[in-house]
Image: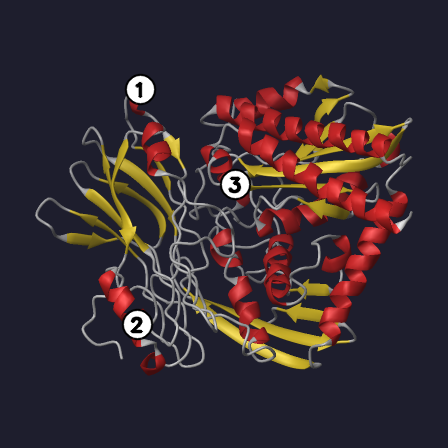
Amino acid sequence: MQELQIQLAWNRLLAIVEEQAQVLMRTAFSTVVREAGDLSAGVFNPAGEMLAQAVTGTPGHVNSMAAAVAKFLKKYPLANLQPGDVLLTNDPWDGTGHLNDFTVVTPVFSAGRCVALFASTSHIADVGGRGFGPDANDVFEEGLRIPIAYLFRAGTRNDVLMEILLANVRDPLVAQGDLYSLTACNDAGAAALLDMMQDLSLPDLDDLGAAITARSDEAMREQISQLPDGQYRYAMTVDGYDEPVEIKALMQIHDRHIELDFAGSSAASPRGINVPLAYTQAYASFGVRCLVGNEIPNNAGSLAAVHVSAPLDCLLNARSPRAVSARHSIGQMLPDVVFGCLAQVLPDAVPAEGASCIWNPVFMHALGAAEDQQFVINPIFNGGTGARPQKDGLSTTAFPSGVRTTSTEVNEVTSPLLFWAKEYTPDSGGEGQFRGGLGQTVRVTHRNDQPFVISKMFDRIVHPARGRAGGLDGGVGLVCVEHADGSLYPLEGKGRDQVQAQTTLVLKTPGGGGFGPADKRDSQAEQADRQAGLVNKTDRR
């Protein structure tokens, strides 16, 4: 292919996968997909290698989906597929790490042969079992697990599979609608790809795909070659389920390659905070890509230069049937651990630790609620990011997940809950020359003074985000129930609790760590923080 044709085709591919993601958001039934963008979308070559991904989406979905398509093809080789076929799974070890994420793969045919595959993933609110949360003892308690199977075969829906799914979830309309949404977005990508191939007179994507992956691979390895070879270690202790867990990383840079080994990390947990290896690889490699080669396209080529491993049966490489529903509460900490290694190589480029794990409670009706009062919602609340070497951290910002906060209006329309406050928590950002991002305070009651249930998957309630280069730690999170007399009853960060009638649930998300000594903070920046109400302490300098 000529250079101009490669560039034109690459730009078209990026537009196609982004439109694929937007179709998914526009048609999704689950609020967390439609409003918060908890999804991924991408195009793959016939070997199952990712060529391009949509900007819209989360690293956990995108990078684990990048490894998933080859698993689909291993079970259903191209020779057995035909036009109108659609495959799906929510198996945590073949997909993106827990049962709530459904991955759908659609082959694209031209002139009688498969020229590409489109894949997409979205978070479906309920898959049965205990519901989304960390309390299960194994994956069998967490909900319905569907192995890689046909959703459509030659255009005909797999009715038996659909009936099984709908019989096992609490909101069958949403589950069915989301599967159609995933199918529709892949179809939109396939149609646009065939148009591109016709416009550019491409019989297939073989030459284009080879050029994309080879250039991305070489560019990534060139970036790595500019780093000093060596070994770099970092460790982080986080809250875990009912006792702290430790994440340990060894980064080795050599031969234009980065290896990350999480040996020494805590053993697998008896609760649902375990992480399948694909999700560990997804967020660990994302942590590298944030600082090394971040302008290089994320695809099979650039991902090949980063190798991630963890010992079998540790927290970060849990085997089936371990419970994994809340795998994000640990997995989303991994970029900060990788940053800790890279800070020894790029000290002027690495931010302090942040809140990292999103706070995504599941709110639902209490047992015995009337049918018209039954509901399930999964809103998103974010904490602060770590301060950067030259800037303050970002407040209430989703890093590393990229999953946006769901709006109060949507939360209240889709549930009988009232959200009385959602505001910055003063002094929650770690002090430093550059301040950590702030967390937020959320206050929730039931509109009809009835009890409701919260399933919690929160972290950094005990162990805060640590500052860097002399910066101080960020503020810890808090979850508690406030009674009418103003007294507070604290709750654990993980697990299911019932919030009694005529009480208020209070959530305070964590803040990010500070960067640099606090006595070096610019006085005008300090004054601006006070005027904005972000800082209330009398003396931070």
Q: Which residue is drawn at 23% across and 62% down?
A: 531
Between disc 1 and disc 3, whose residue precedes?
Answer: 3
Residue 130: numbered disc: none
Which structural element holds mark 3?
A: loop
Of marks 1 and 3, the one in the foreground: 3
C-alpha separation, residue under disc 2 versus residue under disc 1: 54 Å
The front one of 448 and 256 is 256
State the image quarter where residue 264 is shown: bottom right
**Residue type at numbered disc 3:** Gly
CB contact under 8 Å: marks 2 and 1:
no
Residue 505 point in image, percent of width and height: 24, 45
The front one of 7 and 516 is 7
The residue labelled by disc 3 is: 37
Camera sees residue 500: yes
Residue 387 point in image, percent of width and height: 43, 68
Q: Which residue is drawn at 77% across and 23% down?
A: 84
Residue 500 point in image, percent of width and height: 20, 39
The residue labelled by disc 2 is: 524
State the image quarter where residue 539 is shown: bottom left
The front one of 525 and 488 is 525
Q: Would you call the spot at circle 3 few (<14 residues within 10 Å), some (14-19), or many (20 or more)?
A: many
Left/right of residue 342 with respect to residue 252 in the rendered view = left
Which structural element holds mark 2?
A: helix
Between disc 2 and disc 3, whose residue precedes?
Answer: 3
Task: Count the numbered circles shown.
Answer: 3
Residue 322 point in image, percent of width and height: 55, 50
Looking at the image, residue 64 lies above or below residue 283: above
Residue 372: numbered disc: 1
Which structural element holds mark 1?
A: helix
